[in-house]
Image (cartoon, helix red, strand yellow):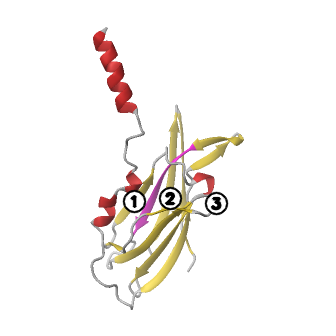
C-alpha cells in the first residue's frame, strides 16, 4: 500500500505543468544566433505578418480548444545569411504579449528555427499574431514564416497551418 501511495505522489508531481519552462521563451535559442557586428546598410528591409491561433472555437463561441502553436522562421536561401530584427507576439486585442529577442539574430542558408507556444499558454487568444522584421541581401529570397497549430484531445487530432504575408 505504501508503494502505491508513493507512486501516486510521484506521478502527480511529474504531471504538473505549472513549473515547466515555456519553451518559446528559451533565451539560449536566441543567444546562439546573436548578431555581434553592425548590419550593412545595403541590406533590404522587410516586415511580415503571421496569424497564429492559441485557441479556436468549437461547437459555438462558448466552447474553446487550446492549441500548441509552432512558428517556423525559415531562411529559404541556399547561399545567403539573413537577419531577423524582431519577432513580436500580439494577442487578439492587438496588445504586445512578448518580444522574443532584443537584438538581431541570423539564420544561415537553409536554416530554420522555431518558436513554440505551449498549449497551456493562452495569452494570445483566438486572434493572436506575429510581426517579423527582417533584412536580407540584394537578390536573396525572402524568409518564410509559417504557423503550425496542433491539438490532440483524446482520440481526436487537429492541425492546420498559416503563412505570413509581407506588409512592408
Report the residue marked by disc 2.
147
The quarter holding residue 32 reads bottom left
Q: Residue at x 42, y 75 (%)?
A: 85
Q: From this viewpoint, which residue is outermost toward the top?
A: 1
Q: Can you say whether 89 is above or below 34 in the image?
A: above
Q: Position of residue 90 (x, y in %)?
A: 55, 62
Q: Which residues are magenta?
A: 66-74
Report the residue marked by disc 1.
114
Q: Which quarter shows the C terminus?
A: bottom right
Q: Residue at x 38, y 26 (%)?
A: 12
- Which structural element holds mark 3? loop
Q: Can you say whether 98 is above or below 65 in the image?
A: below
Is residue 15 visible in the rendered image? The answer is yes
Q: From this viewpoint, which residue is outermost toward the bottom?
A: 42
Q: Position of residue 138 (x, y in %)?
A: 40, 88
* Residue 149 placement, left or right of 15: right
Query: Distance between the Cα atoms at labels 1 and 2?
Result: 10 Å
Q: Residue at x 32, y 19 (%)?
A: 7
Q: Position of residue 1 (x, y in %)?
A: 31, 8
Report the residue marked by disc 3.
93
* Few, some or many residues within 10 Å of mark 1 (<14, 14–19, 20+): some
Q: Position of residue 125 (x, y in %)?
A: 59, 52
Amino acid at each position: 500500500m505504501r508503494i502505491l501511495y508513493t507512486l501516486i505522489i510521484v506521478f502527480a508531481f511529474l504531471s504538473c505543468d505549472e513549473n515547466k519552462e515555456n519553451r518559446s521563451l528559451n533565451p539560449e535559442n536566441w543567444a546562439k544566433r546573436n548578431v555581434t557586428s553592425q548590419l550593412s546598410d545595403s541590406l533590404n528591409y522587410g516586415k511580415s505578418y503571421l496569424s497564429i491561433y492559441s485557441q479556436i472555437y468549437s461547437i459555438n463561441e462558448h466552447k474553446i480548444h487550446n492549441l500548441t502553436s509552432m512558428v517556423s522562421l525559415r531562411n529559404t536561401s541556399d547561399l545567403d545569411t539573413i537577419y531577423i530584427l524582431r519577432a513580436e507576439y500580439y494577442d487578439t486585442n492587438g496588445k504586445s504579449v512578448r518580444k522574443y529577442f532584443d537584438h538581431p539574430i541570423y539564420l544561415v542558408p537553409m536554416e530554420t528555427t522555431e518558436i513554440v507556444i505551449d498549449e497551456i499558454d493562452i495569452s494570445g487568444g483566438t486572434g493572436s499574431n506575429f510581426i517579423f522584421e527582417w533584412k536580407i541581401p540584394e537578390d536573396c529570397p525572402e524568409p518564410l514564416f509559417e504557423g503550425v497549430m496542433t491539438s490532440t484531445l483524446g482520440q481526436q487530432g487537429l492541425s492546420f497551418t498559416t503563412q505570413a504575408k509581407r506588409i512592408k
